[in-house]
Structure formats: structure tokens, C-alpha cells
Image (spheres, rainbow, N blue to C red):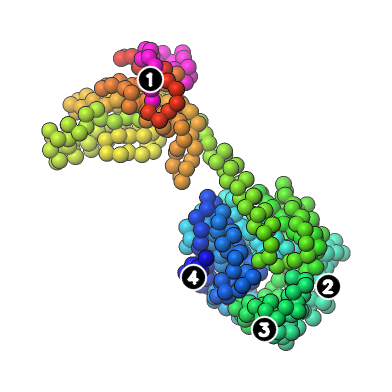
Amino acid sequence: MNPPPVRYARTADGVHIAHQVVGSGPMDLVIVASGLGLGHVWRWQEARPFPARYASFSRLILLDRRGTGLSDHIVSEQQLTLEAQMEDVAAVLEAAGSARPVLLGFETGFAVAAMFAATYPERAAGLISYGARARELWAPDYPFGTTAERYQAEIEEVERGWGSPELAREWVSGLDPGHGDDPREVEEFVGFMQAIGGPGDAARWLTVDRDLDLREILPSIRVPTLVLHRTDDREVSIENGRYLAAQIPGAELRELPGDVHMWSRGEDLPAEVARFIATLHEEQIELDRYLATVLFTDIVGSTSVAASSGDAAWRELVERHHHVVRGALARYRGTEMDTAGDGFFATFDGPARAIRCATAIVEGVRDLGIEVRAGVHTGELQTIDGKAGGIAVTLGARIMASAGASQVFVSQTVKDLVSGSGLVLEDAGEHDLKGVPDRWRLYRVAAA
């Protein structure tokens, strides 16, 4: 896969965040990593396949957090707070046109993803962690962290040896045991370090991460959450993952086999992410269904009327027709969903109002010298790309097509629902509806 172009999103505090968008899956997936390195990850032999794996089932959004990689580098730790880092995600989502993605946080990147999901649950479809902690430092009530003395020693070691083969070999041995003596792996990791930033950048990030503590935030997360962690992870023990899953309401924990901490290794990690996203997508489809009544109308013989009237007169006639229809929709609390030339598609929360609106339209346009036909059906609608869709919409359109001039046809479902409303419905026989299986019994609304 060729690397997509790098684009920049400007945050509210003026920081430029490098990001890339690749893939076209049904849901957006945003990866927030402790360090990604967009300028290197596509050249890194071991890491290069990972974007393609995730982009195969999602619209993948990658970003370099502020102070890393191709994004603006920061000299002030005050600009690296979790609140400030959330701006990175918000700015990239806006620039990428992503309304409600799944957030995948690698290592300390999970802190940003978790904070964003807890603060803006309406903007996150789901949350995933991999190799993450709730807190970096050891505490009496968090015995899985690193001691302050050891952590400080790591910061000093980073400042002395960042980007060197010696430090790279040490890190690779911990992140991917068994490959610390592989010269190619070490060389690749040196390139990764250099792509992330300089020793001052790395030390500053470690200093900021040292004070991370998500324990108060975790119970506030109210989005579907998946915690992924390897059972023998040497860098971040499995107890950290188990703690996250226990503290986040309803979180699912998946313990993956092995001791490789690196996010670019193995097929099981992207496979679990793909499974979780597929589940969320299916649930989203189900939750986006709702019961409503649809109304379709169009002008009968519109082509011949337009031809005999001329363009200017036809345009004026259509405008007057639209005025009548929209007036009826307003009166009967209908919602205009779409209009195509001389036809309207609207929804109602009750079938009786839809029928009365249809008959009002039929009567109202007669004074214009035209006739319309209408179809009404009640069923389950589905939100597709922000629009109402599903078989109920198709049925409503087909029922309308079966009606004649100045007729309002309704389905059996509508007839049953309006029983006792005072509306008179006459049997219009069985009909074949184009593209819809079986024959359908329809009913004609009697004239007032």
C-alpha cells in the first residue's frame, strides 16, 4: 500500500497535527499512539503492513500527536496536558470529516483516547486499548506501575542514548523479545526513534507521561470498550490490562497470547479490532432503526404537463405545488426527507396524520390544474449515511406508483393501525410491487 498524503489540522491552541486517512470501511478508526512517526512508519519493514491491515476493515485515520513525528514540536509541558492533547484528536476528526469514530489507543496514547471518549461520548463510537496502563507510577493502591526511581533513570537514559543503536537494542529486546540481536530490527528502530523526535522531545514526553493517572476517569467512560493485552507482556504487565477492564463499565477484556508488546506485530491484534468494529457496526445498524410512517407523492403525467406548459410556466407550477405540499406537511407535522423534481418523500410519527396530509395535498393541488398520487406505509426505517432508508421506504414508493390520479393508496399495515380513526379505506386489490417479493394487498383512501 502506498502511503497517503500527509495533511495538517490546526488545533484551537495553534498546533499543527500531521495526519493521514486511508481505507473506506464502514466505520472510522482513529489510532492514537504514544509514538507513531508518520514519516517513518510506511518505510519500516515490520510496521509497514499494519496500516493496510486496519484500513482493510475501516476508514483508518493516523496521526502524530503534538510534539512527535511530523506534527509541531512543543517546548512547553503546559501544552502537553491531556486536555490539550484532546485538541489533537478533535482537530483531526474535523479535518478528516469523521463524526463518530472508534478510538484505538496504543500504550500511553490510550490516555488521550480514553479522556476524549469520557469527555465526548457522543463523538466516540467505541474505545480500544492495547498495551496500556491506568497509571505509570507505582502506588500502594496501584502495584503494577513503575517506581519513581526507575522511571527517572529511564528518562536520563533516554536523554543520553536516544537514537543510538545501544538504546534501540535494549528497547527492542523488551518490546519484541528475541529480536534484540537482529541488526536489521535495531537499525529500523533507530529510524523510528529519529522519526519521533530528538532526545529532548522524548524526555519531555516521558516526564509528562509519568504523571498520567486515569483511575478517576475510567468509571466515567460510557462507550463500548475493548481492552487488548498480551498475557506475557514484559513492558506492561497483564495486570494493567485487567485493571483497565475492571474499572471501565462494561469493558470487554481479550487476553492475547505472547510476550510481544509492539503494536505492529502479529495478526491477532488487528483481527480482534476488526471483530470489535464489526460488532459495533452491526449494533449501530440495529440502533439506527426506528418505526415511522412514510409518505410519497408525485405529479401525475408530469412529463406531458411540462411539455405543454413550457419551461417557465412549468417551473412556476412546480414551485406552487411545492408550496402546497410543504404547507400540508407543516399542518400535519410531517418531516420532509427528500424532493426530486415533482415528487416528495416525508415521514410522520403516525399513519393517520400521513393519510390526512396526503388527502390535503391531493385536494390542494387541484386548484393548480394538476393531480397527484400518494402512497403511505408504516414500517421500520434505517438511518443510512444520515438519511432514512430501508425496505419501508422502498415499499412506500412502490405503493405510490400503484395509485392513480388523485388517489392515496396505503398498505395493510397502515389500514390496521388507523382502525377507529374515522378514515374510510376501500380494498384496492392485490398488487405486484416492483422489486418487492410477493403480492401486496393495498387500500384506497375514500374521498371525504
Q: Position of residue 329 (x, y in %)?
A: 35, 31
Q: Are marks 3 and 4 in contact (CB under 8 Å)?
A: no
- Residue at which label 4 appears: 6
- Residue at which label 2 appears: 147
Q: Earlier in the sequence, mark 2 or mark 4?
A: 4
Magenta-drawn segment: 413-433
Q: Earlier in the sequence, mark 1 or mark 3?
A: 3
- Residue at which label 1 appears: 431
SS for callout 2:
loop
Q: Position of residue 292 (x, y in %)?
A: 47, 30
Q: CA gap, disc 2 to disc 4? A: 38 Å
Judged by depth in the image, the label closer to the viewer, 2 or 1, is 1
In front of the other: 379 or 1: 1
Q: CA gap, disc 4 to disc 1? A: 56 Å
Q: Is residue 425 one of those drawn in magenta?
A: yes
SS for callout 1:
strand
Q: CA gap, disc 2 to disc 1? A: 76 Å
Q: Position of residue 50 (x, y in %)?
A: 61, 64
